[in-house]
Amino acid sequence: MSIGRGLGTGLALALAAMAAHAPLSAEDGDVVLAADTTGTPAERAAQMVAQLTREEKLTLVKGYFGGDFPPTEYVAHPDAIDGSAGFVPGIPRLGIPPQWETDAGLGVASQGTAKIKRPRTALPSGLATAATWDVELANQGGRMIGSEARADGFNVMLGGSVNLLREPRNGRNFEYAGEDPLLAGRMVGAQIAGVQANGIISTIKHYAVNDQETERGVANFLLEEDDLRMSDLLAFQFAFESGNPGSVMCAYNKLNGDYACENRFLLTQVLREEWDWPGYVMSDWGAVHSTAKAANAGLDQESGFGLQRDDHFGDKLAEAVATGEVSEERLRLMVTRILHAMFDKGVIDNPVVGDESLIDFEANRAIAQADAEAGIVLLKNAGNVLPLAGAKRIAVIGGHADKGVLSGGGSSQVYPDGENAVPGIEPTGWPGPVVWYPSSPLAELRALLPDTEILYADGSDPAAAVRLAQETDLAIVFGTQWSSESIDIPMRLDGEQDALIAAIAAASGDTVVVLETGGPVAMPWVDDVEAIVEAWYPGRMGGAAIANVLAGMVNPSGHLPATFPVALDQMPWAGEVRRGHVTYEEGATVGYKWFDARGIEPLFPFGHGLSYTSFAHRGLTARARGDGIAVKLTVTNTGEIAGGDVVQIYVSAPWAGWEAPQRLGAFAKVQLEPGESRNVELEIDPRLLARWDLAKPGWQRKAGSYTVTVGTSSRALGESVQVDLDTLHLGPGWKPGG
Ligand code: BGC
């Protein structure tokens, strides 16, 4: 299949230029081509930039949207890949290839404007992957989607995303990795490393505090610096350290008064002066509001001209450089950073080829399925009604379970091979379409349980669904919630599904609810059903993954990466999603930290997740090591079947100065055969033992006896031990091992 116009053009030019000149040395003014592999990425970037004219430099700092965009009558750059997110021209004379950019964190997306929607392998949602608590799986998923991007000719991927789940109604929560900085940062960092293992650049986003979609382009989010450092920025910091992304995308919103893409604090003080990060900052699509202010604050590249209506880094930047408002030196630095990432990540030495026959769809689907299976969370299982056994007649109801599984909408939308399994659901245009992947839980269940009669009602006639449930031994009701970029959504299932579930639960015997949601939802029927399975948006192979968990082929091992509140009034903010100047009064007290600090009982706590087997945690020890704490314990599978346990280590300070009574300090996913024991060693990062100190910038730890506890959720805590720690101050740029 064609992937649109122009893919080969830019590449061909770049390759032709490389072929025309054998690599030369830098002596006597000779041209040195990008393909000359002498030197470090920093040296090569410096050498390249020294050869660029001002005009060429300006070429590299302005990106174009990858598809025609009718509202602005924009026609895509001819060398862009059709329907892609973006394109930045290269410099053929020096063999610097263009940057072909694609969304996003769940797979190779197609923009709504795409002439042909590229069918690619969709991972489960970011929240589902976070629910695996398995950095290896996150890394594998990153490798998989990066390999598809590479095969499509993309060398810049616009994911992963690490915005914290502060607002359960955020329509993009499904793209992100939950509420905890450590879990979110480590999972997304692992994914980024996986993407980049393909010799392409991965882009961490949306930097920073784009934690809701309501007024994302205009609202000003206000957070005290210490709170910011201990929450949203810490998630980014962990992801930077484990993922080492080549680029970061600054967000649409304002943070503490300045737009993120012209925010000196974010772009220069934190990224450069403190974290010493060498990559480049690209804007979100349409997030640039100034020329000199943005460039001087630290923005290196404007993205998506066409969708970015006011073009700030085109002629306006040329003029600003000509007048000295933006210095030549600043322009040089912007380009150096872009080139550094291109050299460092392999974009230049290992050019993308754009040959989709390189994609092994079968292998990639297996990865998507393994991820979905490991991320499904068994929330409730009264009377061990799951895995399914013994029922002769089962009713499957609702959620289009006969056709497929739901996915989240917006720029990250990955399209499946074949048709949308449930076409025509509104909105069919932006922020839709609503896409259902053709992986039917019903069909998969029937295949797994040939001796069970499995009947289906679509739920559109509640009375008929109730009758069906009454005629069977057990009812499985599917509940869905669609969400998308650019909108926020109610914290509940769509339409009348809550009433349907309640009616089925009241009228029939055992009821199992399977949820496909973007994030937390209220469950007014929670006490009336026997089992609840949170399957998130489970990706291209979601139907198979759900069926495997229900039937017991897969032992569920997912744990919640976010608290599920009973109702919004348990959250810091229960009114309409906030607008204008938004003070996030909870500060760093996000998610379980809020519930713990206020003593509120959630519906399901952070870290919760049941299994078909049982685990024991024994012999917990902890001691000071380096600047942090080394933790050891033994995990045993005490049940009858193999399974995956998530070891969660929580840590508390001996004084009341933290944002919450406890923080997640470390975690690990451990797979164990029945009866098997494993010794697990973990490390608590010193920043999780300290507070950000405004008076003496950096991380300040007080001396005292800290409590280290192992839990099966943030509210189910087991053994704990004390560790005496000295006072300690770590500078703002402190990083592990460095
Ligand atoms: C989104 C980004 C995305 C970009 C390009 C924006 O609307 O916020 O996440 O990468 O579009 O499609």
Image (tube, rainbow, N blue to C red):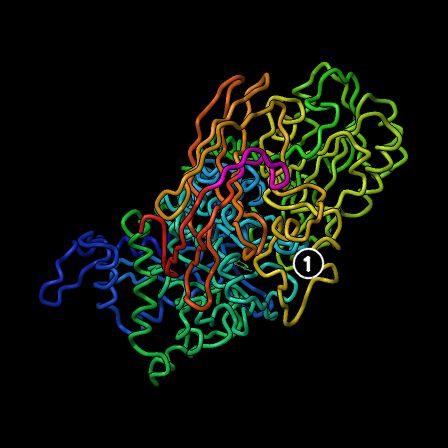
> Residue 440 at x, y = what percent?
67, 32
Count neighbours of disc 1 (C-alpha within 10 A) and say few if under 14, some if 14 to 19, many if 20 or more: some
Q: Amino acid at mark 1?
A: Pro
Q: Please check the rendered image and state whether residue 24 is part of the magenta-colored stretch, yes or no.
A: no
In the rendered image, residue 539, in percent from the top left (x then y), is placed at 59, 39
User: 584 left or right of 627?
Assistant: right
Say what secondary structure mark 1 lies in: loop
Q: Which residue is mark 1?
A: 572
Depth order, front residue of 687/296: 687
- Residue 155 visible in the shown view: no
Q: Is residue 391 above or below residue 644?
A: above
Give, as a single range, the part of the protein colored magenta: 709-722
Q: Is residue 179 visible?
A: yes
Magenta run includes residue 710: yes
Majority secondary structure in the magenta region: strand
Q: Is residue 437 left or right of residue 658?
A: right
In this rendering, would 209 be left or right of 392?
left
